Amino acid sequence: MGHISNTVIPVWFEAARDPIFEIFNPSLKLTEWNLILAGFSVNFDAPTYYGKPVTVITTISRIGSSSFEVYQRCLQESEQTASGKTTMVYFDYANERSQAIPEDIKNKLQTMITDV
């Protein structure tokens, strides 16, 4: 059995960020979107094999005034096969600039924070 393409894991990581997206935009409507992806990195630690169950763990590793960092791990049979960090920015598209993350949203993100 072969391993999956390395292009698949970033797609899984994005899908696993949906609960975070819902904190900022509960309806997930694109017309109300208020986040931008400022950067991401993925480390491939071991092959992820096709046809075997995969678990993606998503946590928050840092919260700033207008941005936050998401840390994610891909596990297969209890082995970490990949990890990644994504920096997201709370963004005002009308004015094309970052904006401060409201305290109520920061509090929700805080419940997802973990040491990396």
Image (cartoon, rainbow, N blue to C red):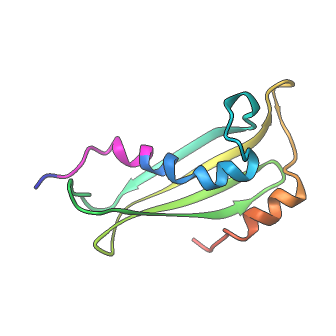
Residue 49 belongs to magenta span: no
Q: Can you give x and y, in whole percent of width and height, for residue 78 in the image?
A: 33, 75
Residue 7 belongs to magenta span: yes
Q: Quadrant of residue 83?
A: bottom left
The residue positioned 66% from the left and 48% from the top of the image is 21
Q: Can you give x and y, in whole percent of width and height, for residue 23 in the image?
A: 73, 53
The residue positioned 79% from the left and 27% from the top of the image is 93
The residue positioned 34% from the left and 41% from the top of the image is 7
The front one of 20 and 82 is: 20
The residue positioned 65% from the left and 54% from the top of the image is 20
Q: Which quadrant of the figure contains the C terminus?
A: bottom right
Q: Which quadrant of the figure contains the N terminus?
A: bottom left
Q: Which residues are magenta?
A: 3-11
Query: Along the horizontal axis of the image, is 100 left or right of 4?
Result: right
Disc tally is 0
Q: Is residue 64 above or below residue 36?
A: below
Q: Can you give x and y, in whole percent of width and height, for residue 105 in the image?
A: 81, 57
Q: Can you give x and y, in whole percent of width and height, for residue 97 in the image?
A: 83, 31
Q: Quadrant of residue 113?
A: bottom right
Query: Along the horizontal axis of the image, is 13 left or right of 92?
Result: left
